[in-house]
Image (cartoon, helix red, strand yellow):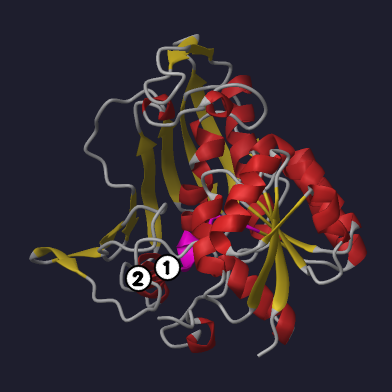
Amino acid sequence: MSALGLGIIGCGVISEIYLKNARLFPQLKLIAVADLNEAAARAKAEAHGLEALTPEALLARDDIDIVLNLTVPAAHLAVGLAALEAGKHVYSEKPLAVSLEDGKRLAEAAATRGLRIGCAPDTFLGASHQTSRAVVDAGRIGQPIAGTAVMMVAGHERWHPNPDFYYAGPGAGPLYDMGPYYITAMVNLLGPVRAVSGMASRLRASRTIASGPRAGESIPVDAQTHVAGVMEFDSGALIQIAMSFDVRAHGHSPLELYGTKASIKIPDPNRFDGQVMLSGADGWAAVLSNHEFGGDNHRALGLADMADAILTGRPHRASGDLALHVLDVIASLLQAAESGRTVTLTSTCARPEPMCAGALAHLTPETA
């Protein structure tokens, strides 16, 4: 099988799992890494047997077909546009951009040049979420009526040594940070969102870093740190969403979906594994899964699927259209919270094609 050359821009914490997993897929050939911090790029290159380049040099390479953009969210637009202008396909960490306008610019640039853009999260392609998709598609819960999407923690300053970007600047806050996982998972199950309503709060003006060399340092908070809302899907289902950096503890499941026949509990959309539970006459029962990619972390699966789609001429699943729609949901929830009005979305997308068991045998990591 042919392979597409892959270059990575951004050598932060998230790059390690991509560097580990991307080289396992035969559709991808890792070539080089780059970062504005040259020392960080050299360290990753030496650890993984790759070349360390400047971002400009990486974009100039003829043997790189796809750029994996792992920069901070505020840089996604600039790096993505530069890669597209260099004739490269782009796959980005979430979110696609820090504003809907920026996301549209990326989508338009890709379309103009006949290039692909893809975007995390790809966790919805894992076993637990594909099992949930199969349950819904088979009609086992009946017509989906309502549900919940809940991610509430006390804040990333507890563990991240440099948490500034979670709280200040474009794309900050829990909805931009974790919302893509939960919204993408629900779009995978239900299709596109029609309208949203919401409220938001920011009750603390600063946070204190708890770990690393900056422990004890206070950082400013500019973002809304608790967002609650309702997503109305085209199907009519109403999904309550709560994303927070203000909650010490709670007892909610990450995702639940309630239908006319049954309800389903869906595992953490930040992971590929987990047990799907379906309600019945005798209470909750586990749903067996025979889908691939049920381990704890298969990040790069969406990237590999995009490479395979480029090579075979089919649509990819973690697509730019999907990511742009999710970004629209995020921006619209914050707009609804600010205005006190229901906001109708301006975008839509198709449900990604399911990954049926065995359908992606050719995508299985070579070492699996």
Return the residue at label 1: 126
80 relative to 14 in the view: left or right:
right
Task: Pick out the residue farthest to the front.
Answer: 46
The C terminus: image quadrant: bottom left
- Give percent across and percent down for residue 113: 91, 64
| Tag 2 and tag 1, C-beta contact below 8 Å | yes
Instruction: Indicate the amino acid at tag 1.
Output: Gly
Q: What quarter of the picture does the N terminus occupy?
A: bottom right
- The answer to whether residue 189 shows anywhere in this view is no
Location of residue 152 in the rendering, given as x and y in whole percent from the top left corner: 36, 33
Q: Please report the residue visible at 60 percent of the width from the left and 43 percent of the height from the top.
A: 329
- Residue type pointed to by label 2: Gly
Cα separation, mark 2 vs mark 1, equals 6 Å
Q: Is residue 322 left or right of residue 236?
A: right
Mark 2, residue position: 294
Determine the secondary structure under disc 2.
loop
Chain part drawn in magenta: 119-125
Viewer-side residue, 43 vs 337: 43
* Near-viewer residue (63 or 119): 63
Mark 1: secondary structure: loop
Where residue 321 appears, as percent x and y from the top left, is: 70, 59
The disc placed on residue 98 is: none
* Residue name at image x 60 percent, y 72 percent: 304
